[in-house]
Structures are given as structure tokens and as C-alpha cells.
Image (cartoon, coloured by chain):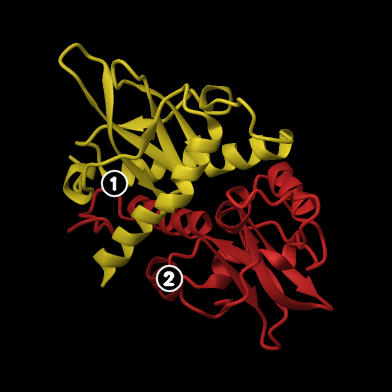
Chain colours: A yellow, B red
Amino acid sequence: MKKGRTILQAKRYGVYTCYPDTPLSEAARKMVAEDISALVVVDAQTGVLAGLLSRTDVLRAHLSLDEWGNALTRDYMSSTVVTVQPEDLLQDAAQHLLDHQIHRVVVVRPEENGTPRPVAVVSAADLLYHLVKDTE
Amino acid sequence: MLTVKDVMQTKSSDLLTVKPEDTVYAALQMMAAQDIGALPVVAEGQLVGMFSERDYARKGILLGRASKNTQVQEMMTTSLFSVKLEHSLDGVMNLMTNKRIRHLPVVDAKNQLIGIISIGDVLKAVITQQQSTISRLQGAPTVSLFEQ
């Protein structure tokens, strides 16, 4: 059995979210205000994971649009999101980042009905922080 | 102990740069096309700044500045940290973590830019080394950098 620290042990719960129908300008404003590089997109009714909107997605949208206009999050978010569970190991999260060449994974906790609810995000920066902490 | 040199040897030697007077729009297009999050800004062979997605997000998007009419030098970060090939990866990890830096310029003894090391590069190098250690010690107790 593999040893190591789980995401649950290492990461505090909490995610910055927006909805698929959130105007892109509003999502961009939130990213800047919170100085974060991605927002987890959740269904407005159920809170279930619907996608991920990264700073890269927003900048690419900005390049293709003259003005924000009515652009919505749903049109620019990634709907395929790599997820992990709180009991997974940090090193497994790191492996996902490398395998999929992505910058973050979303931690989801399945509800009783099995639907995934996002509870945290683990980024490359988080993993680096723990590597540094563990080697100090 | 891993060094910056070990990481740089695994990367493509192509180094993309922009000039201070290039437009932000052109820089963003290059970043989007190459799927990179930051570009070094070079003038007359000298590193003068870094321009990142974060710079644009913080200084461009909300100010409504037209990126086609704005020059990179108006938004780039000029207070820079850099590393050299012989620096240890542990030091780089500390610097990135403590200063919240995702991309660090790598310079030679004459302070000439020779590459960029990103947070993803560092993570990849550490995990790869960890896996190779585990492979070598198959069957024996392993020590993980992630262990408490």
C-alpha cells in the first residue's frame, strides 16, 4: 500500500466559483479581485461541477472578442475537468498534472446521489508548496 | 541534488521572447499559439522584464486597455528574480513558493537570458526523479518527498 499525504490532509476546503451563465467580464473581474488563476464552474441549481474557467481561457476569449459584450462563461470554459477525491494522494494529483499537461485538478466529493460536488482545487503551486514544506 | 541545468536539459532549446515595444496583442497571440503563460522581454540582448498572463489579467483586462494599442513595456513586470544553471532545484522551489512566481528567467554568468523555468517544469523534474528512485529501489522501502 502506498504511503503519503492525502489531499484531505494537505488542503483546506474552499473554491471560488461561477456559473455557466456568468458573464465572462464578471468572471474575469472575480479572478483579478481574488488574484486566482481559475474559477470552478458549477451548475447554478445543483452546485454540481460543470467546468473550469482558467485565466488562459479568459485571455483567449479576450483575444477573439473586440469587447466582452454578452460573452458567457459557458462558451469559453473547459467542460472536461480532471478530478480527484479528497482521499487521493497528493502525488496522484501531481501525476494527473503531468499526464494531462494541466495546471490544476478539481477535488470533488460525491454526494449521496453520486453527483460530484467541487470542494477544492489543487494546483501546481499547491503541490510545489507541499514539496518545499516536506523537504524543509 | 537536482539543479536548474538538469531541468533545462529536458526542455526544447527554443526560446521565445518579445521586445518592450511589441504590442500586448502580439505577445498574447504568441502565448496562446505556443500554450505558454509568460514571455521574457528582451531589449538589445538584455532581459528587461517578464510579461505574463497574470500581468495582463491584472493590468489590462479590467482597465479596458486595448491590447492592440498597448505596448508590452507598459504591462510587463520589471522587478525580476532570476536563476542560474548551477542553482539547486530546492532553491528554485523555495523562491517560486515564497514569491508566488510561476516562471523564472534562467541567465548565464554574464546575465544573458538562456531560458525560462516554470513551476510545471520543476514539478515534472521532482516527480520524475521520485519515480526513478522508486523504480531503482523496487521491493525495498521507499521514501517519498510527499511523505509526512
Q: Quadrant of the N terminus of chain B?
A: bottom left
The residue type indicated by label 2 comes to Lys
Q: Secondary structure at mark 2?
A: helix
Q: Quadrant of the C terminus of chain B?
A: bottom left
Which residue is located at x 28 percent, y 68 percent? Answer: A135
Q: Is residue B9 left or right of residue B70?
A: left
Number of the label disc, if any, that sits on residue A90 = 1
Can residue A103 be seen in the rendering of this structure? Answer: no
Q: Quadrant of residue B50?
A: bottom right
Tag 2 residue: B99
Task: Tell me residue B132's x, y (percent).
Answer: 41, 54
In 3D space, how far apart are the residues under numbered discs 1 and 2 (Cα atoms)? 22 Å
The residue type indicated by label 1 comes to Leu
User: Residue pushed farthest top?
Assistant: A113
The chain under label 1 reads A
Number of numbered discs overlaid on the protein picture: 2
Foreground residue, B24 or B1?
A: B24
